[in-house]
Image (tube, rainbow, N blue to C red):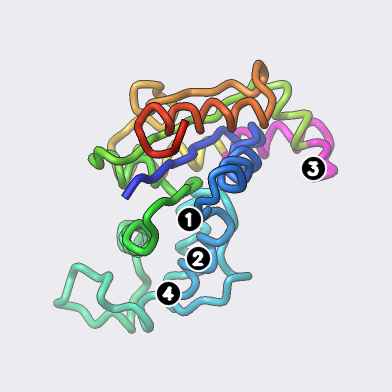
Amino acid sequence: MPVITISRQYASGGSDIARRIAERLGWPLIDNEFVDRVARETGVPPLEVEEREERVPSLVERLARALAVSSPEVFVTAAEPPAGRLADEAELVRATEIVIQQAVREAPYLIMVGRGAQACLAQRDDALHVFIVAPREARVQAAVRRLNLGRDKAEETVNRTDAGRRRYVETYYDRDWDNADNYHLVINTGVFNYDDAAGLVIEAARLRGWVGG
């Protein structure tokens, strides 16, 4: 099934662009909904799952014990009973991969944002991987407005979030998160507005034969 993955620098507009694509194509979107799916898989309330950011330590802190109890099938080491120990990062990543693969199987078309989906699905011929970027200053200013932060805190947020996403992909998939070679399309929202960026992705999907002309 065709799937479009959207990776994004923090505050570059990736989630907003994904929503526009989904609305225009009528495709299902897994973005914040991804949190609910991971929560169902692990038995953790959705509010306990970090939204949007691939920050492995946070997932470890929030999900590990519930994962060990409710989803022992994700543990690859059978010698030790899972309920009595803290899940490690790799096991939580595998739980996320299970959710990704389930989502891909469920719908004939799909748009997926974040969570390393572009790396998890890298070998699929029917995937279009998109990376949304923006000038750093624009992203810092967006963080100031959205989160009502001072400039120093906004810069820290941008740096920390991007670093977490980079680490997640590099650690578990041995891929450079921000290397253009790992994507089919890189769009700079400092040049294209969100509607135009969505149009570029839709045109790429059309050229792949996934949508009508």
Tell me which label, 4 or 2, sits earlier in the chain: 4
Residue 71, percent from left and from top: 34, 78
Q: Amino acid at mark 1?
A: Pro
Q: Amino acid at mark 4?
A: Thr
- The reply to whether discs 1 and 2 touch (Cβ–Cβ < 8 Å) is yes
Residue named by callout 4:
42
Residue named by callout 2:
61
- The reply to whether discs 1 and 3 touch (Cβ–Cβ < 8 Å) is no
Single out the residue that lies furthest toward the front. Answer: 213
Quadrant of res 5: top left
Residue named by callout 1:
57
Question: Marks 1/2: CA distance?
Answer: 6 Å
Comparing 103 with 199, the one in front is: 199
Q: Return the mark for residue 146.
A: 3
Single out the residue that lies furthest toward the top. Answer: 191
Question: Marks 3/4: CA distance?
Answer: 30 Å
Residue 208, percent from left and from top: 35, 31
Query: In front: mark 1 or mark 3?
Result: 3
- Secondary structure at numbered mark 2: helix
